[in-house]
Amino acid sequence: MAGEKIMVVVLLVLVIFLGIAVFLFYVERRLSVSEKKLKQLEAKQKKQEKK
Amino acid sequence: MKAIVELNALLRKELLLEWRRQSALGGVILYLFSMVFLAYLAFDGRINTETWNALFWLILLFSAMNAIMKAFIQENERRHIYYYTMVSPTTFINAKIIYNAVLLVCLALLGFAVFSSFMGNPVQSLSLFLINLLLGMVGFASVLCLVSAIASRARNNFTLMAVLGFPLILPLLLVLIRVSGQTIYGTSFSAVTPGFVTILLLTAIAITLSNVLFPYIWKD
Amino acid sequence: MQNFRNNWWKIAGILLLVWVIAGGLLFDVPQLPVLHETIRNIYYHVGMWFGMIFILFAGLVFSIRYLLWNDPADDVKAYAAVLVGLLFGALGLLTGMIWAKFTWGSFWVNDPKLNGAVVGVLTYLAYVVLRGSVDDRDKKARLAAVYNVFAFVLFFIFIMIIPRLASASIHPGLDGNPALSTGDLAPEMRKVFFPAIAGWFIMAYWLFTVLYRTMRINLKIEEITENS
């Protein structure tokens, strides 16, 4: 009985943890997209200032 | 040599300022008296030794914070620029620390006198207790001066000073309270030596850090 | 994700912690009096604690760099580091309290190391409050950096030295080292404990990088909207 319970706990914690990891990767992807956009925006601004 | 001359001059200036504007110092002393009296009323004059110790140090802590807040927050902009051109930042902060240390020692002795008269004096090893008090006040000054310097540059300076100062002063305070407790029950010099060493160490570190860090706050 | 070369360490961290979670709960542990199964807490509580110290130390480095070279990126990094440090500190306290309930019967005890932990969290919460109290960006960065240096040194001394001076502490690992003692480093525990330290370090750093990037983007957006 105790063996089963601990397996449930382990799986639960693992699921939560992996969920967090997946979430972090997702956030990072969104960040990369934003960073690229910002770079383009900044490059555009610099060109405008040079004109 | 120049540094020491400047230090002297600054110290003298502080003393003069304090003397002229007695209201600030008076305020601090009044604060101390009020807290002691409040404690007396709240506890009905009867407390056990542990409570005496803890209460005494708490009152000292708040009075010290009150006193040092005024050290930085009361000076205005123009005078600050004047100091900026005249002396180096390290001289300035050291002068503040030394002056406030002396101030706090006097305050603490006064506080002890008043507190004892209301709540009794259970201290056995009096000389060691007083040495602890002395070291403690120097320690308070060295930690709190830099905190006050930081807080004075921000909004909400009085609350901020307490918020910033409390966690940083806590290690020192805990050692002081412990040693103080030992001296109340009666103890020997060798027994409190580790405590004293810790206090001196913390004080030395605080002074060194203040000297290193204060110039960065100075650039304003 | 795009490139594996940059991100391998995150996968490593994940794998390490999967090992730690599964192994920490399933592998055998030495049966010590009082502690029994709760000794497993070491893998999480102590691991997170080390992670916190590590990331706060990084924060210290960033603050020093800011004071020396005035690069605003360092200030943002310091702030991100402190926030992650606070998170780990809070988690450390939480796991500590849960463990305390099982081991000593109550959530809190008057003990120098626990008090030290609270002082640490208070110190860094004060850092956040300080940043909130200053409007000017440069001033905020400078004052925050000064406070961070002051705070970390005092905090570090507090947690390292004070517990050793205390006469008695029921918190494990009193003989000199605040975290470990001989019983805890039994060989069967080492194979989970050391990966745990590494895993938590990696997680702390990962969270830090994500937070830093987010803050940096927000700042840039502010700047662009201010300039246009």
Image (spheres, rainbow, N blue to C red):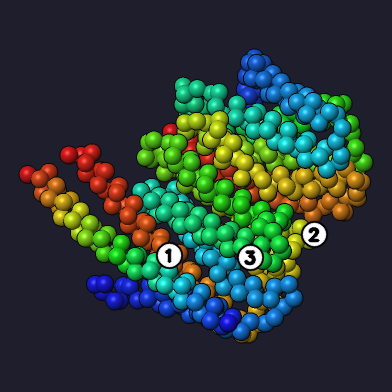
| Amino acid type, callout 1 | Tyr
Q: Few, some or many C-alpha atoms within 10 Å of disc 1 (few <14, some 14-19, many ≥20)? A: many
Q: Position of residue B37 (x, y in %)?
A: 78, 24
Which mark lies nearer to you, 3 or 2? 3
Instruction: From the image, tell me which residue sits under label 2.
Output: C167
Measure how far apart labels 1 and 3 are at the Cα level: 25 Å
Q: Earlier in the sequence, mark 3 or mark 2?
A: 3
Tell me what residue is drawn at x 56 percent, y 47 percent.
C123
| Residue type, label 2 | Ser
In the image, residue C160 above or below residue B160 = below
Subunit of label 1: C
Q: Nearer the viewer, residue C95 or C170?
A: C95
- Which of the marked residues, 1 or 3, is nearer the chain's N terminus? 3
Residue C76 image position (x, y, % from top left): 38, 51
> Toward which corner of the image does residue B53 lie, by quadrant?
top right
Identify the subunit bearing mark 3: C
- C-alpha gap between disc 2 and disc 1: 36 Å
- Give left or right: position of C198 versus B12: left
Image point (90%, 37%), residue name = B122
Give the residue at mark 1: C205
What's the CA distance linking mark 3 and mark 2? 23 Å
- Asked whether the viewer can see residue C65, the reply is no
Q: Secondary structure at mark 3?
A: helix
